Image: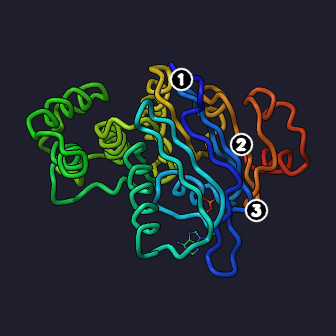
Amino acid sequence: MSEAPLLSATGLHLSFGENHVLRGIDLTVHRGEVVALIGPSGSGKTTLLRSLNGLATPDAGRIVVDGGPGEQVDLTFDGSPRRAWGRAGRRARAARESLRDRSAMVFQHHHLFPHLTVLQNVVEGPVQTRGVPRAEAESRALALLDRVGLADKRDAYPRELSGGQQQRVGIVRALALQPDLLLFDEPTSSLDPELVGEVLTVMKELAEEGWTMVVVTHELEFARAVADEVLFLDDGVVVERGAPAQMFSAPRRARTREFLHRIL
Ligand code: ADP
């Protein structure tokens, strides 16, 4: 197996107008690792996550994803217009699309299609974007739903499910894409407290199974138990990074201490 990191991002900058949101972010994720992103609201965590799967386009920096032989994505951002025409534009778009193919995102709100059943919600992605035959996508989807205890909900509509069940379907929908990298954007933050546990349990199981994950979270207990590395972002920079045990019990930087003090 290749020793190269699955994902390596260097020097990422991104501005929305005058708002310089990412100010030189470096991030390395090895296969099977779980990286947790923590930090105050507005510090750039979601924008960073969206940059990793091509939903946001940095102005500068580089993202390399090593998905195996013939599956490497190498994107350098040079501030050229996001909708550039010509060969360079086509190349950039193709690279962003392959970035999207390598990863799958679980959002804060589940984003399930309300008019589709649970099974249809899971099957549409692989069929539409990955060209998987429908029968195969369905049998895979059913196996995944079974794994998270939702096989009996296959014909239910999202509104008939609890928030925790909806998020578990969101996770299954991401898994069904068979990504190299799973990205989670605060998947439990919109849930009632009693529903948080069932979603974190599924995420913990995925980590134990060896999925590579980048997780934006405020659940520090979860990060402590599951993450290999924690990055503390503030104001668009990584202020501190390290193993959770060290970071949470002996943060080196004053800003990290203040943040942890506030939310613990
Ligand atoms: P976090 O996830 O840490 O809360 P975000 O990445 O969501 O931070 O936001 C960082 C900053 O970028 C905020 O000031 C936010 O208002 C701004 N921002 C995020 N997305 C957009 C967007 N699509 N357009 C303009 N500004 C945005």
Q: Earlier in the sequence, mark 2 or mark 1?
A: 1
The residue at the far front in this view is 87
Q: Residue at x 76, y 26 (%)?
A: 245
Asked whether the viewer can see residue 255, the reply is yes
Percent across and percent down for residue 184 are: 49, 45
Tell me the element at label 2.
Answer: strand
- Amino acid, disc 2: Leu
Query: How many angstroms separate mark 3 from mark 2 (CA)?
Result: 13 Å
**Is residue 217 rendered to the left or right of residue 246?**
left
- Amino acid, disc 1: Ser
Q: Nearer the viewer, residue 94 or 113?
A: 94
Within-10-Å neighbours for mark 2: few <14, some 14–19, many 20+: many
Check the picture and name the quadrant holding the C terminus.
top right
Above or below for 231 versus 221: below
Q: Which residue is mark 3?
A: 235
Asked whether the viewer can see residue 188, the reply is no
Q: Which residue is mark 2?
A: 231
- Amino acid, disc 3: Asp
Within-10-Å neighbours for mark 1: few <14, some 14–19, many 20+: few
Mark 1: is the Cβ under 8 angstroms from ligand 1? no
Above or below for 205 versus 170: above
Q: Residue at x 73, y 30 (%)?
A: 244
**Where in the image, quadrant-wise, is ligand 1 located?**
bottom right
Q: Residue at x 28, y 54 (%)?
A: 112
**Is residue 57 rendered to the left or right of residue 99?**
right
Q: Earlier in the sequence, mark 3 or mark 1?
A: 1
Percent across and percent down for residue 202 are: 42, 30
